[in-house]
């Protein structure tokens, strides 16, 4: 474990002002969780099971150790093969924590963990797939509001959709309901602006590091959210917002809120992924109707028809939904998470069409073991989606 030193003095020096802890045990625990964040991709259930069973510190020692996987895996309810596979995919990222922590300290980021009073307990519902820590900018107290709603929808929103999102957010925020969204173009941005316009609470959940606002065109908006509300991510500073991480981010938006409202969405919109997570968690789900001829509302109509989402026509409907208790739990028949996630997307996210990347680099970026990354790259090469280029790989067919 030469590259991972869990002594209290090392932990305190590495964390600096990222955390406010009173004792060495708390400092080491926070440091271990920060390291876990750099080793794993969002929602890693093997890591979550280890930490839940052994605590962050001992779990990390098991993760980076070379002792037999059989006994700790059994204690955590895992197979030894699952733990061995986890070790293999975490291995390429050992050492990444140094740069992540350095970047976070320079950016004035605050790290919070489940041991902190500010930790949003709603995330507990994610079980083993809950984030191991959160990286934040802004007022961390707003992460756990009394009442919260997620307003999400299409990036390519219509004027109608943006108007409705802005109005819903402003009315909800002015009545004390915190507004969560993803800071994307379209509906997300309109929701944040609506809450900001009435000086209400709004929280932006990002798919990349909190110190690098994305999309770039929303830098000013995200900065405003950080000043008035809070910006949060489960991936460490320096992380790029990949398609895989956007999908992982969606489960956080759903879990951090008491209900989710899809304002405008196409038939296959990514906003439906957030709706899927909300329904799986047993949280109320609403959808705003649009014109029957509108492609940007087709996803909302699908939710209304096939998932019995609550029809949202104004702020009063949102408030009623938030007070109506749980809706019937979604059984997964309509939206399969595999439609939106997968190993293929993670590998492609790690590649570029401009320059070649080695298999080891692809493994580190995608969160796979080197062996798994090599196997997947081989399959994608047969598919014609990636190309060998010198000693590495790049996206796109061969010339």
Image: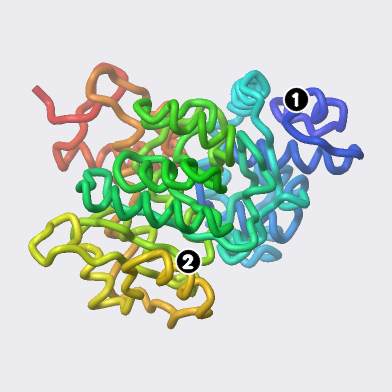
Q: Is residue 59 left or right of residue 211?
A: right
Asked whether the beta carbons under mark 2 and mark 1 sit within 8 Å of each other, the answer is no
Q: Which residue is mark 1?
A: 14
Q: Tell me what residue is drawn at x 37 percent, y 63 percent.
A: 275
Q: Nearer the viewer, residue 13 or 210?
A: 210
Residue at disc 2, secondary structure = strand
Q: In the rendering, at what x and y percent does residue 159 appear?
A: 21, 46
Which mark's residue is nearer the viewer, 2 or 1?
2
Q: Which residue is mark 2?
A: 259
Q: In the rendering, at what x and y percent does residue 316 appear?
A: 43, 70
- Few, some or many C-alpha atoms within 10 Å of disc 1 (few <14, some 14-19, many ≥20)? some
Quadrant of the image for the C terminus? top left
Q: Tell me what residue is drawn at x 63 percent, y 57 percent.
A: 145
Residue at disc 1, secondary structure = helix
Quadrant of the image for the N terminus? top right
Would you identify the image quadrant in which residue 60 lies? top right
Would you identify the image quadrant in which residue 107 lies? top right
Judge whether 9 appears above or below 255 on screen. Answer: above
Looking at the image, tell me whether mark 2 or mark 1 is earlier in sequence order.
1
Q: In the rendering, at what x and y percent does residue 282 appear?
A: 48, 74
Answer whether residue 143 is visible to the viewer in this image.
Answer: yes
Answer whether residue 129 is visible to the viewer in this image.
Answer: no
């Amino acid at each position: 474990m030469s590259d991972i030193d869990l002594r209290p003095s090392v932990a305190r020096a590495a964390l600096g002002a990222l955390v406010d802890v009173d004792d060495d045990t708390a400092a080491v625990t926070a440091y271990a969780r920060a390291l876990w964040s750099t080793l794993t991709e969002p929602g890693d259930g093997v890591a979550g099971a280890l930490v839940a069973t052994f605590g962050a510190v001992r779990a990390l020692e098991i993760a980076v150790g070379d002792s037999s996987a059989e006994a700790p895996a059994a204690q955590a309810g895992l197979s030894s093969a699952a733990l061995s596979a986890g070790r293999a995919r975490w291995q390429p990222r050992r050492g990444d924590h140094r740069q992540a922590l350095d970047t976070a300290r320079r950016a004035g980021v605050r790290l919070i963990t489940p041991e902190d009073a500010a930790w949003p307990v709603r995330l507990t519902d994610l079980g083993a797939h809950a984030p191991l820590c959160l990286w934040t900018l802004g007022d961390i107290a707003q992460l756990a509001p009394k009442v919260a709603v997620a307003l999400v929808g299409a990036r390519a929103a219509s004027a109608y959709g943006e108007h409705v999102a802005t109005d819903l957010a402003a009315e909800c925020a002015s009545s004390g309901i915190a507004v969560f969204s993803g800071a994307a173009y379209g509906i997300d941005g309109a929701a944040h602006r609506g809450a900001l316009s009435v000086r209400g609470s709004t929280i932006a959940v990002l798919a990349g590091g909190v110190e690098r606002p994305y999309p770039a065109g929303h830098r000013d908006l995200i900065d405003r959210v950080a000043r008035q509300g809070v910006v949060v991510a489960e991936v460490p500073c320096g992380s790029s917002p990949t398609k895989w991480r956007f999908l992982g981010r969606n489960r956080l938006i759903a879990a951090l809120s008491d209900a989710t409202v899809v304002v405008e969405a196409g038939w296959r919109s990514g906003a439906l992924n957030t709706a899927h997570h909300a329904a799986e968690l047993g949280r109320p789900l609403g959808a705003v109707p649009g014109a029957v001829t509108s492609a940007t509302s087709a996803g909302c109509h699908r939710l209304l028809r096939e998932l019995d989402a609550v029809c949202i026509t104004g702020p009063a409907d949102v408030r009623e939904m938030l007070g109506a208790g749980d809706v019937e739990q979604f059984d997964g028949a309509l939206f399969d998470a595999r439609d939106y996630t997968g190993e293929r997307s993670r590998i492609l996210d790690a590649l570029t069409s401009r320059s070649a990347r080695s298999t080891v680099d692809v493994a580190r970026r995608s969160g796979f073991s080197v062996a798994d990354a090599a196997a997947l790259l081989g399959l994608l090469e047969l598919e014609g989606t990636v190309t060998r280029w010198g000693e590495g790989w790049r996206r796109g067919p061969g010339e």
